[in-house]
Amino acid sequence: MPRARRHFIPGHIWHITHRCHKKEFLLKFAKDRQRWMHWLFEAKKRYGLVVLNFMITSNHIHLLVTDDDSKDVISRSMQSVASRTAQEYNWRKKRKGAYWEDRYHATAIERDDHLFRCIVYLDLNMVRAGVVTHPSDWGFSGYNEIQNPCKRYALINYQRLMQLLNIQTVEELKKSHSGWIEEALRNNSSIRASKWVKSVAVGSKEFVEMTKENLGFQVKGRRVSRSGDNYQLREQQTAYRPLFAPENSSLSDDNTYFWDESDVI
């Protein structure tokens, strides 16, 4: 069965979203979310994935990553995390069938101002959902890790994040990050913005046009459009169709992770 085309440019920042099969709440319990974090940490160690932020909800994940110009780091990491999470969950629950939706979606994000806005968007996910009133109350995201940096088992690469945001110290990162969140909460800026999850690229006009040129035929027919003070390269909308019937959906490395367009949350 052929895979969907992958949008990939080494060295870019990517906002990845991946939803559980048929929007099932397969990440409902803390243990399941912790296991996803465990496998993300293992992928970080094994492949050198650079994690900038993350968010785990009950039925989907958000991941903000870069690869520092290393080929296949992101695709191999996503393949590993998705397959390990699915296989372990199905074994533990004595369950059969697909765990993830048939594809994951990736949006290229420009650094600096656009990057911090995307970070805030991830951190406020569960506030938007009405589950918590402040991101500090949700333990399965990068917010608390940025505010309380880990010395061991950290998922987020603080040094790379600071470099991309042009911030010099961890204390400055914590202060700036907290300020962005509080400002967004005061201004009721936690509303859903589809550009972060349904675009091929978000940033300045120059960045988006450069991304479109670099992707070439993979984004043929897409148009660059303006959204407020951002530009975006929009995806063509496609209907979701499960690829695997429950009776034959063994969770191999080939059955659940795709990089092309998707109508994700």
Image (cartoon, rainbow, N blue to C red):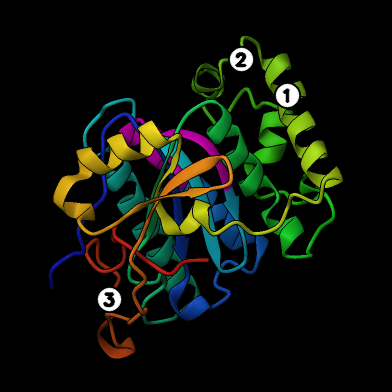
Check whether the beta carbons of the residues at disc 1 and disc 2 lie within 8 A of each other: yes
Q: Position of residue 243 (x, y in %)?
A: 27, 80
- Regarding residue 153, the answer to whether it shows in the image is no
Type of residue at label 1?
Answer: Ser
Q: Nearer the viewer, residue 90 or 171?
A: 171
Q: Secondary structure at mark 2?
A: loop
User: Any mark on residue 250, and which?
Assistant: 3
**Residue ID at (68%, 21%):** 173
Circle 3 crowding by C-alpha within 10 Å: few under 14, some 14–19, many from 20:
some
Q: CA distance from mark 3 to mark 2?
A: 45 Å
Query: Is residue 244 rendered to the left or right of residue 137?
Result: left
Q: Earlier in the sequence, mark 3 or mark 2?
A: 2
- Say which amino acid is labelled 3: Ser
Identify the magenta region.
40-54
Earlier in the chain: of badge 1 and badge 2, it is 2
In which quadrant of the rendered view does residue 206 lie? top left
| Towards the viewer: 197 or 29 | 197
Residue wearing tag 1:
176
Count the numbered circles shown.
3
Q: Is residue 84 left or right of residue 181?
A: left
Mark 3 or mark 2: which is in front?
2
Q: Tag 3's secondary structure?
A: loop
- Residue 132: x and y in percent read 81, 58
Query: Which residue is located at x 18 percent, y 64 percent?
Result: 3
Q: Is residue 118 visible?
A: yes
User: In 3D space, how far apart are the residues under numbered discs 1 and 2 (Cα atoms)?
Assistant: 9 Å
Which one is closest to the eye, mark 3 or mark 1?
1
Element assignment for label 1: helix
Q: Which mark is residue 167?
A: 2
In the rendered structure, does residue 34 fall within the stretch colored magenta? no
207 to the left or right of 178: left
Q: Considering only vertical position in the picture, is 231 above or below 138? A: above
